[in-house]
Image (cartoon, rainbow, N blue to C red):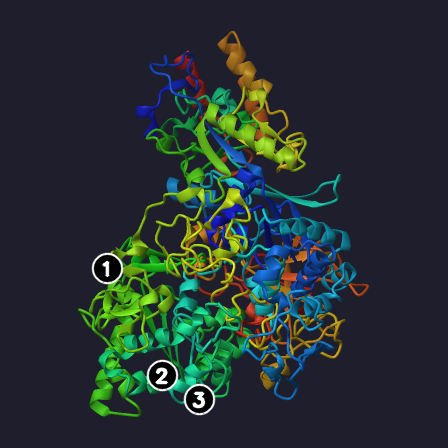
Amino acid sequence: MTNLWTDIRSTDLVIVMGGNAAEAHPCGFKWVTRAKAERGAKLIVVDPRFTRTAAVADYYAPIRPGTDITFLLGLIKYCIDNNKVQWDYVKPYTNAAFVVKAGYSFKDGLFSGYDPAKRIYDRSTWDYEIGPDGYAVVDETLTSPRCVWNLLKEHVAAYTPEMVERICGTPKAKFLHVAAMVGEMSAPDKAMTSMYALGWTQHSYGAQNIRTMAMLQLVLGNIGLRGGGVNALRGHSNIQGLTDLGLMSELIPGYLGMPHDNEKDLQTYLKTRGFKPLRPDQISYWKNYPNFMVSFLKAMWGEAATKDNDYHYDWIPKLDKPMYDMMQAFELMAHGKMNGYVCQGFNPLLSGPNRAKVTTGLSKLKFLVVMDPLDTETANFWQNHGEYNNVDPAEIATEVIQLPTTCFAEDEGSLTNSGRWLQWHWAGGDPPGQAKADAWIMAQIHLRMKALYQKEGGKLPEPILNLDWQYKVPANPTPDELAREMNGKALAPVADPADPTKILVAKGKQLPSFAFLRADGSTACGCWIYSGCYTEAGNMMARRDNTNVGDANVYPKWAFSWPVNRRILYNRASCDLTGKPWDPTRKIIWWNGKLWTGYDVPDMLPTANPEKVMPFIMDAEGTARLWVRGLMVDGPFPTHYEPFEAPVVNVLAPRIRGNPASRVFADDLAEFGDAKEFPIVGTSYRLTEHFHFWTKHDRVNAMLQPEFFVEISEQLAKEKRIANGSWVRVWSRRGSIKAVACVTKRLQPFTIEGRTVHMVGIPLHWGFMGLTHKGFGPNSLTPVVGDANVETPEFKAFLLDIEPTTPPAGFHGA
Amino acid sequence: MGAARTMTVVRSSATSSANAAVSFRDEVVKLIDVSKCIGCKACQAACIEWNDTVQPIGYFTGSYQNPPDLTPHMFTLMRFNEWVNPKSGELEWLIRKDGCMHCAEPGCLAACPAPGAIVQYENGIVDFVQENCIGCGYCVKGCPFDIPRISAMPAKAYKCTLCSDRVAVGDGPACAKACPTEAIVFGTKQEMLHHAAGRLIDLKSRGFAEAGLYNPGGVKGTHVMYVLPHADQPELYSNLPANPRISPWVKIWKGAATKYASLAAMAAFIVGAVVHHVASGPNQVSDKDEEEARKLIEGRR
């Protein structure tokens, strides 16, 4: 989230699109009901289904799965055409005026530089024109045809309300109703908040879905304001923490990049990460990258990492391809190229696309380690459960090692919520049986591996042997010790750069924030963005003072919010160029003539001149980006692509299937279905009664939603002669499942290109373990292809067919 | 029934006189704002957890409603209704948390033949006292909202207690505590009426001209009230009765001049009840139950 849960209370308009906040985030949704009840805020839901969020919305508009970019670009076009643009925000605070260099183009659905054989772009033309002064050229009059604003106008020209209806299936009148409500939010004293989740991410252009909303919010002047922002509703209670700590193959903690093969040494690695400001007076805070990276290396290898040995940058693994995501891992397994898999708090048999491929991959492993509080389907993938897991155990040689772990309530530590709050929690009980904390298990594995390397040697033992491991009890690092390590400490006295005689942090002390990190080896920090969470003042995450300072709804004394306890990112943009809040009734920070001050930690140098230093300090431009240069692999602007399995061709670029920059493995390409064979759109989602695959193990949740079902419209039911509550078979090119049908008015067919497009909704909580009845998940049907930038699988739009069937053996009705 | 020690009973089933109230306690109300309800069933989960009941794991029967109906183990239930508003042509998914309304004039209590099996506290909570319950099912017939359910073995009537045990020690009901969107709120009647008035202003501003408070006069008002966007059509909300009132038969036999007349009325009522509602299985009112009930009533009068 750019903002935070409690801030939603301050909004004027909530748009829930690409998510289902009421069902998937019911506790956080209270801030929506508060905003509605306390300040008369309105709620818009745009969703393929009439969800429980829609049930309490002021306005609902349907949309065909996978067409959100068209809808949002349509909204941007509407705002531009109807002058619903907050000009005083857009002109100085975005890159609207930046001039794009010659060579960049967009035609027939493709940007300049596309290589169809490799499915990648050469992004060298996706940049600004650089002037003789070394800075990007800007045209403040917005008259240059190559300035970002005019390129944007040209880019969105195709997305008329008629085109929105044609692609999205949203009736024009409904689209215009939404557009009118959204357009009102361009007033300086109005703010809209966007709440989204996996409904946007689980597409082959998921990151671009979110970008399009970010662009709309910039056009409306809603980023950095109370009640504004683009707000990701994160899952699993700590998914935000997972990404923050870099638990992804291409990241190291704090969103630093995992080095690639061609980045042989630290200097080469840092060379492309210099982040020189692109405009005069701008901060470009990522220029501190070396401080973060070297401090991370010091946290990894302590005294062994020195200036002379490049802080042992050589010990960091180097990527030979963009990433080793889940789909890549199962591709390797399926081809026998990955032999062991450690599965920690993850149930890929039900959450990886194309379950048949997941089963194939797991079956070819030598060993599978599962660390989980529950007895998961993945750990039992080799068991035969009739048609629910039809495998032959005799054919599977994989050794499965189950290591039972504590669940969150049996463990101490911090959870990072969607609003970036690190909230400390304490164990509420002892774990049952042999269950152990994950940190304890990881420590055992590390120490045993270290002992083996010491005894037997091996290839490159040094990173393991020298891993900094200064815990009081090496076999059991405490959450407290780990948290202090994340925060970082001074390994040598940290001096003031302006006055080297002035020592800011004494040796051995916890650092107050990442502003004190150094690239000279004098500081260690496990995760720079978390610095400040555990200082000499104590564990800031454990703070429990819920004073509503300034009635701003940001609760700055509760827990700790990264970065530097800042609650609203880009909050400098909540004020005009003179530093005056756009909405005096909703102040968050302001310029007092000398300093930035307010109820939140300013996202700005305290002394920075408001008229010179622009609000988006992380960007080299100082501004936000309506056009993102080469920062995304699939285009500087979002554009309409159909899902890889789509019921219609891409009307704007008929020759393009899916996202042209998405990675597709050959075997998976062969398993994509087409609309002739599979005319119906499938989509997947969660239900409020369950949490992923956990709560089916709990008797109360199991009772509240006991059995797998799929949802279809009354029209489709009639066409296929399916009665409510009867059994159906649903299949795609990759698999076939049985379910009970839920025939409902909440799903309606779409009219696309003059024909009826039906949809089947498939919730995801069932499997063959636990207390609920055995069932399937959508992943038995879904294709293996993901977002071009981050490889989130395309779970939200695919093709299938449906027919009535008989109940599975032993089931009710059988 | 920990509540009995700290809350004062003002009415008790099958007894002619109420205890004199020794202290006045504020009337309480649980207000359910349908317009804020997201149908998440946290109230159902909290209800099961607090009351420590075990509701068997059922099946999907074509609706999100689970279990499909109230049971002796599930005292509250989210009921779902898909309704196309003929005025707007738009779908509305009307979700209502069903459960005991804690009527000011409780039909269950009036119908109950077992002394002390149903009590009403001065704060308005109507509670079932299972030790005294004979499982006859008359409360089911007496209830204009079809709330009580009779367990199999032993046969006892169950329903929402409004968490009388929690209220007695100053807590609100478990469902209100669990409700993530503050759709369920609890407080004194005065506070809740005030809160509801504010909600109605908000709903009317959003175009719900007929928004209103459901607090039906036929049972002299209730201690569970609903804020309804379509208060002119309460039946839309999974058959919430527009004009709930206690069956005239219950009034006749409990209010009659002589025990013979009332017994006659009761007999007619039982016939109706047996045929009409408590129709099958162990919930049936047996001859023995009737005899027991008669003895109890005669003994008391």
Query: Looking at the picture, how far across and down is residue A636, in whole percent?
Result: 62, 73
Question: Which numbered mark, 3 or 1, is in the foreground of this view?
Answer: 1
Disc 3 versus disc 1: distance between alpha carbons? 39 Å
Question: Which numbered mark, 1 or 2, is in the foreground of this view?
Answer: 1
Q: Nearer the viewer, residue A384 or A704?
A: A704
> Looking at the image, is B123 positioned above or below residue A558?
above
Instruction: Quickly name the residue at label 3.
Output: A261
Instruction: Determine which quarter of the picture holds residue B248.
Output: top right
Label of residue A316 in the image: 2
Left or right of residue A238, residue A130 in this image: right
Farthest residue to the left: give it: A472
Which callout, 1 or 2, points at the residue further toward the start of the chain? 2
Instruction: Quickly name the residue at label 1.
Output: A536
Q: Nearer the viewer, residue B77 or A187?
A: A187
Query: Looking at the picture, how far across and down is residue A274, in whole percent?
Result: 45, 78
Amino acid type for the residue under numbered disc 1: Glu
Farthest residue to the right: give it: A754
Q: Nearer the viewer, residue A51 or B252?
A: A51
Q: Nearer the viewer, residue A459 or A672?
A: A459
Disc 1 versus disc 2: distance between alpha carbons? 30 Å
> Looking at the image, is A489 positioned above or below residue A79?
below
Circle 2 SS class: loop
Instruction: Determine which quarter of the picture holds residue A495.
Output: bottom left
Count of numbered labels shown in the rendering: 3
Q: Name the chain letter of the residue that bears numbered label 1.
A: A
Left or right of residue A218, residue A318 in this image: left
